[in-house]
Amino acid sequence: MNREQMSRIAHSGHPIKAPLDDASVRRLLERGTPRGDERLLDLGCGSAEWLLRALATGPQLHAVGVDISDDALTQAREAADRRGLGERLVLHHGAAADFVSPDPFDLVLSVGAAHAFGGLLPTLAAARAHLAPGGQVLIGDGFWEHPPSPEAVEMLGDFTDLASTVDRVVADGWTPVHGHVSSRQELDAYEWACWGTLAAWGLDRPTDPDGPRALAMAATRRSEWLRSYRDTWGFVTLLLRRTAD
Ligand SMILES: C[S@@+](CC[C@H](N)C(=O)[O-])C[C@H]1O[C@@H](n2cnc3c(N)ncnc32)[C@H](O)[C@@H]1O
């Protein structure tokens, strides 16, 4: 079993691959699509769960998702067809930084995928290149709630605190018009969903060589979370408009 298959199992109980619950996702999408006929682009869409939820509640919306993972895009296509949303969803396989489109987008999303661009500000620069006049960006990224250990930085990357994160975004020419800081419950629910689901999958397959592997991976990741970053890492999702231009 490769890394992508392991990730697919781990996320099967939490298809949004970020620490937000269903109500938070719904609220952010509602704010991001005030007219109801927007064109959406998701850079690093994964299995396109954000787009599928938007399309399901907005019958006039159209969406494009980009991801580097073949497995995630296959899952997205299957889910779109199963949910009757396939005609309004276009999926592109490739690096999000290389994606080009002749038409701009009203809402550009990138949640938990800033590493694809080398950080928060490069992700915003990429989103801006695709943005229609008056459009909005929905971006989700980590921050340090408390000073991290060197292991946590090694594991998750080099973030700043929440206020400094927002300051950097504002200094880059954006104004937050809405935002969501993941609660302790959302952060914990996400980790338990991933590593609990993977562990259960492993326990159910004691004679399959992948069973013990999945169980060992779940134990490692659960321990890394509890010991290295649970007390210091947070996640913020910002809805942004350009301040001027
Ligand atoms: C944590 S997941 C988030 C998925 C989705 N945004 C969500 O919230 O459910 C990060 C995604 O970024 C994708 N990714 C990583 N590097 C990428 C790249 N260079 N170009 C496009 N996608 C990339 C991964 O394949 C993965 O699907």
Image (cartoon, rainbow, N blue to C red):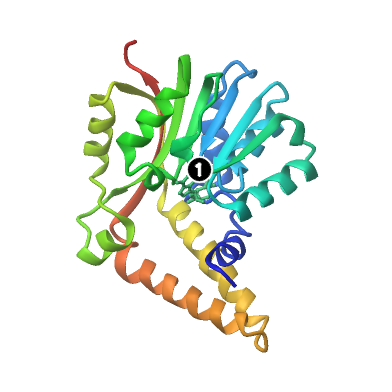
Tell me the quadrant of the picture where the N terminus can be found: bottom right
Q: Position of residue 76 (x, y in %)?
A: 67, 46
- Residue 218 falls left or right of residue 155: right
- Residue 16 falls left or right of residue 231: right
Q: Residue sitting at 44 percent across and 45 percent down?
A: 113
Q: Position of residue 102 (x, y in %)?
A: 55, 20
Q: Residue sitting at 80 percent across and 37 percent down?
A: 84
Q: Residue sitting at 23 percent across and 45 percent down?
A: 160
Whether 154 is drawn above or below 29: the answer is below
Whether 153 is drawn above or below 168: the answer is below
Tell me the quadrant of the picture where the C terminus can be found: top left
- Residue 28 falls left or right of residue 126: right
Q: Position of residue 170 (x, y in %)?
A: 27, 26
The amino acid type of the residue labelled 1 equals: Gly
- Residue 169 falls left or right of residue 35: left
Write down the residue under mark 1.
44
Q: Residue sitting at 56 percent across and 75 percent down?
A: 199
Q: How many marks?
A: 1
SS for dot 1? loop
Q: Residues within 10 Å of mark 1 (few under 14, many from 20)?
A: many
Task: Give the image quarter of residue 26.
Answer: top right
Q: Nearer the viewer, residue 53 or 45?
A: 45
Whether 86 is drawn above or below 208: the answer is above
Q: Position of residue 235 (x, y in %)?
A: 38, 47
The reply to whether the residue tagged 1 has its Cβ within 8 angstroms of ligand 1 is yes
